[in-house]
Image (cartoon, rainbow, N blue to C red):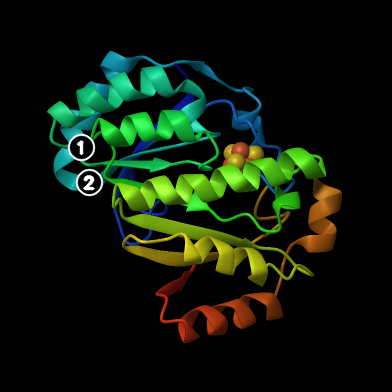
């Protein structure tokens, strides 16, 4: 597997939880605000030393709530990931997966094998936030909705992150996503930020659409009116 590294104790990768976090390389999307774009594009990556990882995880396991895998898009390497999750399960450490939910068949295989205990995903809306031409982006949005169905079918607890961009009204898509959810979930609103806090893939895009203000307040109010638990990310 290709990785850019891991952190044995992290308190910022899953809301309110302590995680051992592993970053895997590669991604099928091109989100303009991506601050992990070097990992997504396979830069700064090296082969994972699985034995060292598992030993380190075992020694930190008493401290952590989840072994959390993020990226990039971890399901780009889903076969090896499934095998790693099976090994982690032997340590009795719960597994959390951060995925863009568009690689649905492999996701379902991992859930069916009972290898994942928690999912985190971004609801990227409108689909132009995928950074791809319109038709592929719409297809990916439909795959994402199918991914939400699968997470609901297997009743996996979900952290639904909503990146909030200045000037976008994504309510139609948010409602469409929420309607698919039939599992325990909460929302983390993630206002997009550009430099100096992050190094996004597309600085021009971020100069227009990062640092939203009123959009975050409006969304938080609308979601709370629906009875959704909402948190703000640390930015
Ligand atoms: S934000 Fe996530 S899904 Fe989008 S390009 Fe970056 S790693 Fe991939």
- Distance Cα–Cα, label 1 vs label 2: 7 Å
Residue 235 lies in quadrant? bottom right
- The residue nearer to you, when weighing 51 against 220, is 220
Is 78 placed above or below 62 here?
above
Q: Position of residue 82 (x, y in %)?
A: 33, 24
Q: Position of residue 127 (x, y in %)?
A: 70, 52
- Indicate which disc residue 60 carries: 1
Tell me whether circle 1 and circle 2 mark residues in contact (CB < 8 Å): yes
Is 51 placed above or below 176 here?
above
- The reply, left or right, for residue 69 in relation to residue 67 is right
One can see residue 229 in this view: yes
Residue identifier under label 2: 64
Q: Give the residue at x 41% y 34%.
A: 107
The image quadrant where one finds ligand 1 is top right
Q: Position of residue 227 (x, y in %)?
A: 41, 81
Q: Position of residue 67 (x, y in %)?
A: 29, 39
- The residue nearer to you, when weighing 4 against 15, is 15
- Indicate which disc residue 132 carries: none
- The reply, left or right, for residue 232 in relation to residue 38 is left
Q: Give the residue at x 62% y 22%.
A: 42
- The residue nearer to you, when weighing 177 against 20, is 177
Question: Label 1: how many residues lie within 10 Å, few (<14), some (14-19) or many (20+)?
Answer: some
């Amino acid at each position: 597997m290709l990785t850019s590294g891991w952190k044995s104790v992290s308190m910022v990768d899953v809301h309110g939880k302590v995680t051992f976090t592993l970053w895997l390389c590669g991604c099928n999307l091109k989100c303009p605000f991506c601050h992990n774009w070097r990992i997504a594009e396979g830069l700064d990556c090296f082969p994972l030393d699985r034995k060292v990882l598992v030993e380190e995880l075992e020694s930190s396991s008493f401290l952590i709530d989840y072994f959390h895998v993020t990226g990039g898009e971890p399901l780009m390497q889903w076969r090896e990931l499934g095998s790693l999750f099976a090994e982690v399960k032997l340590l009795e450490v719960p597994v959390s997966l951060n995925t863009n939910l568009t690689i649905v068949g492999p996701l379902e295989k991992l859930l069916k094998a009972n290898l994942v205990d928690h999912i985190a995903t971004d609801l990227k809306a409108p689909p132009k936030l995928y950074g791809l031409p319109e038709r592929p982006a719409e297809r990916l949005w439909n795959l994402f909705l199918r991914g939400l169905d699968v997470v609901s079918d297997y009743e996996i607890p979900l952290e639904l992150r909503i990146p909030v961009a200045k000037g976008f009204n994504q309510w139609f898509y948010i409602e469409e996503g929420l309607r698919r959810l039939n599992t325990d979930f909460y929302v983390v609103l993630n206002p997009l930020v550009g430099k100096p806090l992050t190094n996004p893939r597309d600085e021009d895009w971020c100069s227009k659409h990062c640092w939203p203000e009123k959009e975050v307040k409006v969304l938080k109010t609308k979601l709370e009116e629906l009875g959704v638990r909402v948190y703000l990310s640390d930015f």
